[in-house]
Amino acid sequence: MVQDRTWQKSEHQRFKEEAEMLKTLQHPNIVRFYDYFEELPSRGKRVIVLVTELMTSGTLKTYVLTQSLLCFYHSVQLS
């Protein structure tokens, strides 16, 4: 969810344009972006919800740390 501070109309339009562009982006190394919607929860602040592909393999941080350790391990073995 993206918390919506008071956006100017031009910023809101720019977000919509970027979201539409992201819908067309397809790459095996990029999480797929499907859609977004806006809602007004009970607290009264409008939020924007981003709908993306479900990734079950962990966080990006975990992946990077794991890959970095693997690369380090392999480079040490090659030395």
Image (cartoon, rainbow, N blue to C red):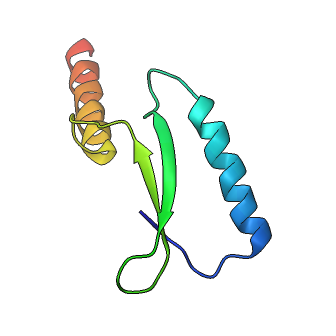
Classify the position of the N terminus by image quarter: bottom left
Q: Nearer the viewer, residue 3 or 29?
A: 3
In the displayed structure, 37 sits above or below 66; it is below
| Residue 20 image-quadrant placement | top right
Give the residue at x 27% y 45%. 59
Q: Nearer the viewer, residue 27 or 52?
A: 52
Q: Position of residue 50 (x, y in %)?
A: 45, 52
Classify the position of the C terminus by image quarter: top left
In the displayed structure, 58 sits above or below 46; it is above
Q: Position of residue 2 (x, y in %)?
A: 47, 65
Give the residue at x 37% y 36%. 53
In the displayed structure, 51 sits above or below 27; it is below
| Residue 63 image-quadrant placement | top left
Q: Position of residue 7 (x, y in %)?
A: 67, 76
The reply, left or right, for residue 39 in relation to residue 77 is right
Give the residue at x 76% y 72%. 9
Q: Which residue, as the protein is rendered here, is positioned at the far top?
A: 78
The reply, left or right, for residue 57 in relation to residue 1 is left
